[in-house]
Image (cartoon, rainbow, N blue to C red):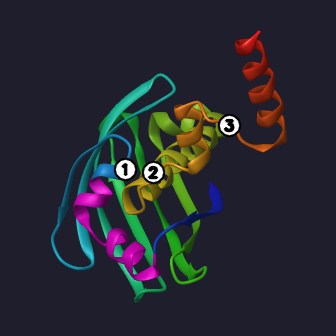
Amino acid sequence: MKMADSQRIEAPRETVWAALNDAEVLKACIPGCEELTKHSDTDMEAKVKLKVGPVKATFGGKVTLEDLNPPESYRIVGEGSGGVAGFAKGGATVRLEEDGPDATILYYDVDAQIGGKLAQLGSRLIDSTAKRLAGEFFKTFGETVAPSQPDEAAEDAAAGEKKGWLGGMFGKKDAKAESA
């Protein structure tokens, strides 16, 4: 299975790099992660509980960071076993590109192999689950690294303030209705 995508994160590249190498941040962002132990700057061990279709399993595995080029890129390689449920192994190349002084585009390119009961579920289910899990990870990661600030439009709506020509029309109409 192969998958590639990117995500814009509203934080400087150095901040995103630091978070990608922080075991606590990764543990909080990996769906189903129960444990993540960092043994060195390049070696980690994880325990992740997942449900893929009808198969539920706890995977234990090792993760290694290779080809480190701080703060631009690295390759993450891992292998995990879920007992009877099967195994997964593969890697991802992660690249960070500055997008102005306060934003970063995170690119990832994943390749993975699975075996055991997981492999019997069918590629469509596996692919959709992998995309969902990757989406959850990167959404949570982006929110953790750069918490979103409430935008003015949401604040104005919460305050009941109407802006723009459409809001102006309705605002005036409401004012006329109140005076009548």
Give the side of residue 47 with respect to residue 143, left or right. left
Question: How many marks do you count on the picture?
Answer: 3
**Residue on which disc 2 sits:** 137
Give the side of residue 167 with respect to residue 61, left or right. right
Is residue 19 highlighted in magenta? Answer: yes
Vertical position of residue 13 compared to residue 140: above or below: below
- Residue 173: horizontal and vertical position, in percent? 81, 22
Q: Could you give the CA–CA distance between mark 3 and mark 1, rounded to whole angstroms? A: 22 Å
Check the picture and name the quadrant holding the N terminus.
bottom right
* Type of amino acid under label 1: Ile
Where disc 2 sits, the SS reads: helix
Give the number of the mark in front: 3 or 1: 1
As drawn, the residue found furthest toward the bottom would be 69
Q: Could you give the CA–CA distance between mark 1 and mark 2, rounded to whole angstroms? A: 5 Å
Residues in magenta, as a range:
12-27
Vertical position of residue 81 compared to residue 40: above or below: above
- Circles 1 and 2, Cβ within 8 Å, touching? The answer is yes
Pointer 3 local density, CA inside 10 Å: few below 14, some 14–19, many at least 20: few
As drawn, the residue found furthest toward the top would be 180
**Residue on which disc 1 sits:** 30
Q: Which mark is residue 124?
A: 3
Q: What residue appears at the point 53 percent right and 58 percent down from the top-left corner?
A: 112
* Type of amino acid under label 3: Arg
Q: Which circle's residue, 1 or 2, is located before the other in the chain?
A: 1
Give the side of residue 56 with respect to residue 138, left or right. left
